[in-house]
Amino acid sequence: MNEEEIKAKLTPEEYAVLREKGTEAPFSGKLLHDDRDGMYKCKVCGQDLFSSEAKFDSGTGWPSFDQALPGAVKEIPDDTMGMHRVEVVCSKCGSHLGHVFNDGPTDTGMRYCLNSVCLDLEEKK
């Protein structure tokens, strides 16, 4: 899928976040409080990224997970906005998903803080 096809597939907000590294407003995402069981997938390419079993409420305003599926994401140093963070992108299509922090409350110690507009939830049947 080329960039024009991706842009045609997404809403302007989805494109701004996924392809231009934007961020949705906190506490606005449709998946923030979603507690259905299933698989969170990349909105662009459909790759499985996170299991609902890894999701937790971080209180930060974005869906949070304590681990990604093996090989599903890449972590890239991000020194924009005057701070050091680690960007999380889909390993298949390179779309921006959010950032990961090492302040999570579970045994992994990780908090993948993601934008709802980047994800689709395929509910378990």
Image (tube, rainbow, N blue to C red):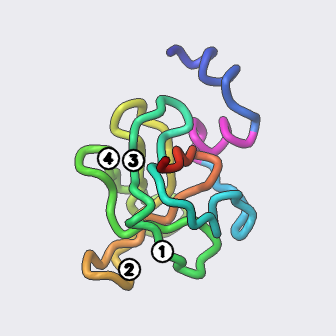
For badge 3, the amino acid type reads: Leu
Q: Earlier in the sequence, mark 1 or mark 4?
A: 1
- The magenta stretch spans which residues? 13-21
Write the residue at 41% across / 36% down.
Answer: 47
Task: Residue at 57%, 44% (x, y): give it.
Answer: 120
Rendered location of residue 7, percent (x, y): 66, 24
Gap between marks 2 and 4 measured at Cα: 18 Å
Foreground mark, 4 or 3, reads 3
- Tell me, for residue 1, which label it has, or none: none
| Amino acid under disc 2 | Gly
Dot 4 falls on a residue whose secondary structure is: strand
Q: Which mark is residue 56?
A: 1
Q: Secondary structure at mark 2?
A: loop
Mark nearest the camera among 2 and 3 is 3
Q: Secondary structure under badge 1?
A: strand
Q: Nearer the viewer, residue 37 or 57?
A: 37
Q: Mark 2 or mark 4: name the one nearer the start of the chain.
A: 4
The amino acid sitting under disc 1 is Phe
Name the residue tied to disc 2.
104
Residue designated by label 3: 49
Give coordinates of residue 24: x percent, y percent: 69, 56
Graded by Cα atoms within 10 Å as few (under 14), some (14 to 19) or many (20 or more), the crowding at tag 3 reads many
The numbered mark, 3 or 1, whose residue comes first in the sequence reads 3
